Image (cartoon, rainbow, N blue to C red):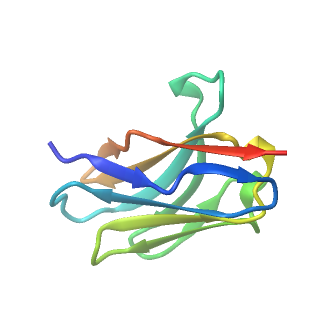
């Protein structure tokens, strides 16, 4: 079973930056959509928020609260998605999960914790 492996989370002060990465543990095939979601403290899995997505063609979409601060990108050769997070705010604190859509199947990472201190 292929798993998605995230990295790059951590503790940062408000105004700082982090870069998250997500790649599969093995061959996964052609990935239609890559995305990042986050689950804030105290929220349930069903309340995960879509942060950003990027299609195979490079089209992107962001939740309003991160526009202008976060940038999603992908390296198709490496089947890797990145999330560059700048000007971080305490309200960005959450566990961040990557998701790949492959042939209408959704794969999730295990999550990486991001904590932004004020």
Q: Position of residue 110 (x, y in %)?
A: 38, 39
Q: Residue at x 33, y 44 (%)?
A: 106
Q: Quadrant of residue 27?
A: bottom left
Q: Quadrant of residue 76?
A: bottom left
Q: Residue at x 60, y 28 (%)?
A: 47
Position above or below: 116 against 86? above
Q: Position of residue 113 (x, y in %)?
A: 55, 41
Which residue reaches farthest right?
A: 118
Q: Position of residue 37 (x, y in %)?
A: 54, 45
Q: Quadrant of residue 85?
A: bottom right
Which of the image's four quarters has the N terminus? top left
Q: Of 115 and 37, which appears nearest the observer?
A: 115
Q: Position of residue 70 (x, y in %)?
A: 67, 64
Q: Of 103 and 35, which appears nearest the observer?
A: 35
Q: Residue at x 42, y 76 (%)?
A: 57
Position above or below: 94 against 20? above
Q: Residue at x 32, y 60 (%)?
A: 23
Which of the image's four quarters has the C terminus? top right
The answer to whether residue 13 is left or right of residue 101 is: right
Position above or below: 88 against 107? below
The answer to whether residue 8 is left or right of residue 68 is: left
The answer to whether residue 26 is left or right of residue 105 is: left
């Amino acid at each position: 079973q292929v798993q998605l492996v995230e990295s790059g989370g951590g503790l940062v002060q408000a105004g700082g930056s982090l870069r998250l990465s997500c790649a599969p543990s093995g061959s996964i095939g052609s990935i239609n959509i890559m995305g990042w979601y986050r689950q804030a403290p105290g929220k349930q899995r069903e309340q995960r928020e879509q942060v950003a997505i990027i299609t195979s063609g490079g089209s992107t979409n962001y939740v309003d609260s991160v526009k202008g601060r976060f940038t999603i990108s992908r390296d198709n050769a490496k089947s890797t998605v990145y999330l560059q997070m700048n000007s971080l705010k305490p309200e960005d604190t959450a566990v961040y999960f990557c998701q790949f859509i492959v042939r209408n199947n959704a794969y999730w990472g295990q999550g990486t914790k991001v904590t932004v201190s004020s």
